[in-house]
Image: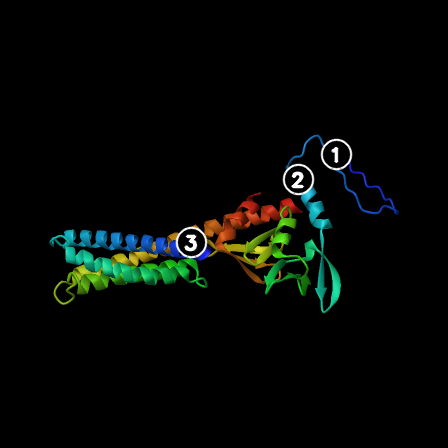
Amino acid sequence: MKLQIDEIPNLEETEIIIRCREVDDRINRIGNYIRTSYITINGKDNGESYVLYLDDIYYFEAVDNKVFAYDEHKVYEVSYKLQELADLLRKTSFIQVARTVILNINKIEKVSTLVNGRISAVLINKEKMIITRAYAHAFKQKLNG
Amino acid sequence: MSNKKFNILKFIANYLIILISIFALITIIFAGLLEFINRSVLSGKDLLIFFIVSAVASILFSIVFKLNNISIVLQAIIIYFLLSLIVVLVGYYVLYIYDIGHNYKLFISTIIFIIVGLVFLILFLIIKLRKVNKSLNENLKNFKERDH
């Protein structure tokens, strides 16, 4: 495999092209990683706008028709609807785990099963999230790849 | 079908499943117990009382199944305890098979069976839960490795 990185200072948008004989699991993983790394979300906190990187976001939560992004320490309001985010982040490490929550699997430290087919997830920051029964199957499927 | 209607139908279906399961279970338990002490078979009146007891117990069981903040082991223990209580109370007050003053052996052996069953249930649940959690966490670890 050859890796070539060309630095072009006046290029308008970064372009990544992968040339391969066929798209296999590894190529898909690389594609997903690049997508995750380059998708940014605009968030607002106290009236100031911030560019949020997906890698830093723990989860998105919808509260009273507003959607918030949570990183390790702060909460940002984002302009997307939860369903739009679910569609946008389908091929990333994010997955909807409750009617109002989209969770970043990479931020989960450990999981354990609960009653009624629900799953409890402890995040890296020790916060606890519940994966409801309706979304538990999709969650397990995503973990299995 | 509206969401509300679907939820009501789902609740009724779940309730009926629990009701039928409890009714079948206590009927089998008492049929076995009566056979064991050489007493006559269950009458229609007994079955009617079983059904009423099952209907009330099903409400309690539905509530326990809905509890979200307790572990699956505790939930199973509560269900098992309630079921054991039903067996002892129905045996004492309806079928009069637990005559503690004159024939304490059946009562003592029932209690021993209940305790042994409880120990097995706890051990089984702990082992199964550990296995499921281990597999889930391994999958989580693999996912993170794949993603990075």
Q: Position of residue B143 (x, y in %)?
A: 60, 46
Q: Quadrant of residue A21?
A: top right
Q: Position of residue A49 (x, y in %)?
A: 75, 63
Graded by Cα atoms within 10 Å as few (under 14), some (14 to 19) or many (20 or more), the crowding at tag 1 reads: few
**Farthest residue, direction top:** A21
User: Label for residue B73?
Assistant: none
Q: Which color scheme is applied?
A: rainbow
Q: Nearer the viewer, residue B103 or B12?
A: B12
What type is the residue that disc 1 sits on? Arg
Q: Secondary structure at mark 3?
A: helix
The residue where tag 1 is placed is: A19
What is the spatial separation of the Cα atoms under label 2 and label 1, in whole angstroms? 12 Å
**Farthest residue, direction bottom:** A46
| Chain ID of residue with mark 3 | B
Relative to residue B134, is residue A44 depicted above or below? below
The answer to whether residue A89 is seen in the rendering is: no
Q: Name the residue rendered at 44%, 57% in the picture.
A: B4
Q: Quadrant of residue B66?
A: bottom left
Q: Are marks 3 and 1 on the same chain?
A: no
What type is the residue that disc 3 sits on? Phe
The residue where tag 2 is placed is: A28
Left or right of residue B60, residue A122 in this image? right
**Farthest residue, direction right:** A10
Q: Position of residue B29 (x, y in %)?
A: 22, 53
The residue where tag 3 is placed is: B6
The answer to whether residue A42 is seen in the rendering is: yes
Lower sequence index among marks 2 and 1? 1
Graded by Cα atoms within 10 Å as few (under 14), some (14 to 19) or many (20 or more), the crowding at tag 3 reads: few
Q: Name the residue rendered at 80%, 46% in the picture.
A: A14
Q: Nearer the viewer, residue B22 or B104?
A: B22
Q: Of discs 2 and 3, which sits in the foreground?
A: 3
Marks 2 and 3 close (CB-CB < 8 Å):
no
